[in-house]
Image (cartoon, rainbow, N blue to C red):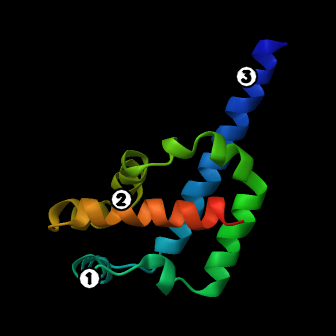
Amino acid sequence: MKKAKELMKNLALEMAINAGRGFLNEQLKNVTPEILYEAIINDEDLWLSLPIHVKKEGTRLAKKFGSIFRQFYDSINLELILQWLKEDRPELFSIIVNTEGGIEWINGQIDNIKERILIEI
């Protein structure tokens, strides 16, 4: 019984992580390296520039998987997001790691968006 619970928990986490990754990729589909570079050097707050429908979709995702995400809150971190970007959008990954302050900027954005989506629902 304990193994079945652990298996279900891992399956739910995998589904939630895949949903989060899909959400991120969907939001980045129109982001060019130039747009990202400008956001980094201007220290833009991505949350403020997100359209309302994106914020609502993030809230919907959090309502569906929020309890799972909260259990693994610390696992949704800079390393995970950079891994996804490196695999899914290498040109954006390159801009982040090669722009002065890029790593710090994206780390702050991750924390801000996690707070907004996961805590404020």
Q: Amino acid at mark 3?
A: Glu
Few, some or many C-alpha atoms within 10 Å of disc 3 (few <14, some 14-19, many ≥20)?
Answer: few
Dot 1 falls on a residue whose secondary structure is: helix
Q: Earlier in the sequence, mark 2 or mark 1?
A: 1
Query: Looking at the image, which residue is at 85% across and 13% down?
Result: 1
Relative depth, front residue between 8 and 87: 8
Query: Looking at the image, which residue is at 50% across and 77% down?
Result: 47
> Relative to residue 27, is residue 68 depicted above or below?
above
Q: Amino acid at mark 2?
A: Asn
Q: Give how far apart the Cα atoms at labels 2 and 1 are.
A: 19 Å
Query: Looking at the image, which residue is at 73% across and 22% down?
Result: 6
Image position of 41 (left or right of 113): left
Instruction: Using the image, tell me which numbered label, if any, was put on residue 34.
Output: 1
Residue that numbered label 3 is attached to: 6
Picture quarter with the C terminus: bottom right
Q: Amino acid at mark 1?
A: Glu
Q: Give how far apart the Cα atoms at labels 3 and 1 are.
A: 43 Å
Dot 3 falls on a residue whose secondary structure is: helix
In which quadrant of the rendered view does residue 59 lie? bottom right
> Relative to residue 23, is residue 37 depicted above or below?
below
Q: Name the front one of labels 2 and 3.
A: 2
Dot 2 falls on a residue whose secondary structure is: helix
Instruction: Count every numbered label the image shows and give the total.
Output: 3
Q: Earlier in the sequence, mark 3 or mark 1?
A: 3
Q: Give how far apart the Cα atoms at labels 2 and 3 are.
A: 30 Å
Query: Residue 38: x percent and y percent?
Result: 26, 83
Residue that numbered label 2 is attached to: 107
> Relative to residue 63, is residue 42 depicted above or below?
below
In which quadrant of the rendered view does residue 61 lie? bottom right
Q: Earlier in the sequence, mark 2 or mark 3?
A: 3
